[in-house]
Amino acid sequence: MSFVLWMTGLPCSGKTTIARKLQELYPKLVVLDGDELRAQSSSNDFSREGINENNRKVANLAKDFSMSKPVCVSLISPFKENREDARKVIGDDKFIEAYIECSPSVCEERDVKGMYKKARRNEIKDFIGVQTDYEISDKPDLTVNTETNSLDECVGQITEYLLDYDQNFEDNFG
């Protein structure tokens, strides 16, 4: 059974790091990373409308890939409506929302690209976590705290969840 693991959280919370580690362990897992997809589309529209459009495109892409393979989406997806819309596009039975939890201060410490500093100097407008609030999920399927847990512990927690979701996960996708 394929699925879409939709990892959401603040910038620099650890979504991409977790996604890459999962892909290393499970090579058949398709990773759709928000930063990479945005770079390919050359879209720097971080307005609410721009974010909504980007999330819609990623949800449709994830749905297409999930027809034959499991998908891991690493995307800020800051608004509850984004995640609800993605769940509708992909299908409730295939959509797993994972909130990657990390405090804004730790995310800012991890920011090797300097995005938070640029946002504080207004060089980046509408930056999530600075000018625009991230809306924490009311009921994510899974919450993974990257501030208090190591990468291996976070990946282990997700793998355990996926094994409960699909008992043949490791056999089919490892």
Image (tube, rainbow, N blue to C red):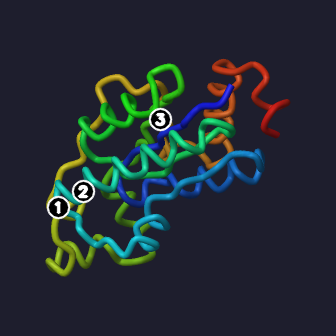
Would residue 117 appear left or right of 21 to someone viewing this image?
left
Would residue 25 appear left or right of 56 to someone viewing this image?
right
The residue at the point 85 percent across, 30 percent down is 171
On screen, residue 67 above or below 48: above
Distance from disc 3 to disc 2, alpha carbons, whole Å, reads 18 Å
**Residue type at tag 1:** Ser
Look at discs 1 and 2 and give the one toward the viewer. 1
Pointer 1: residues within 10 angstroms few (<14), some, or many (20+)? some
Give the x, y percent position of residue 136: 28, 37
**Mark 1: secondary structure:** loop
Are the residues tagged 1 and 2 within 8 Å (C-beta)? no
Q: Which residue is mark 1?
A: 47
**Residue type at tag 2:** Gly
Q: Which residue is mark 3?
A: 98
**Residue type at tag 3:** Ala
The residue at the point 65 percent across, 41 percent down is 155
**Mark 2: secondary structure:** loop
Q: Disc number at residue 129? A: 2
The mark that comes first in sequence, 1 or 3, is 1
The residue at the point 37 percent across, 59 percent down is 11
Distance from disc 1 to disc 2, alpha carbons, whole Å, reads 13 Å
The mark that comes first in sequence, 1 or 2, is 1
Q: Nearer the viewer, residue 57 or 32?
A: 57
Pointer 2: residues within 10 angstroms few (<14), some, or many (20+)? many
Q: Nearer the viewer, residue 135 or 71?
A: 71
Which of the 4 quarters of the picture holds residue 44? Answer: bottom left
On screen, residue 126 above or below 101: below
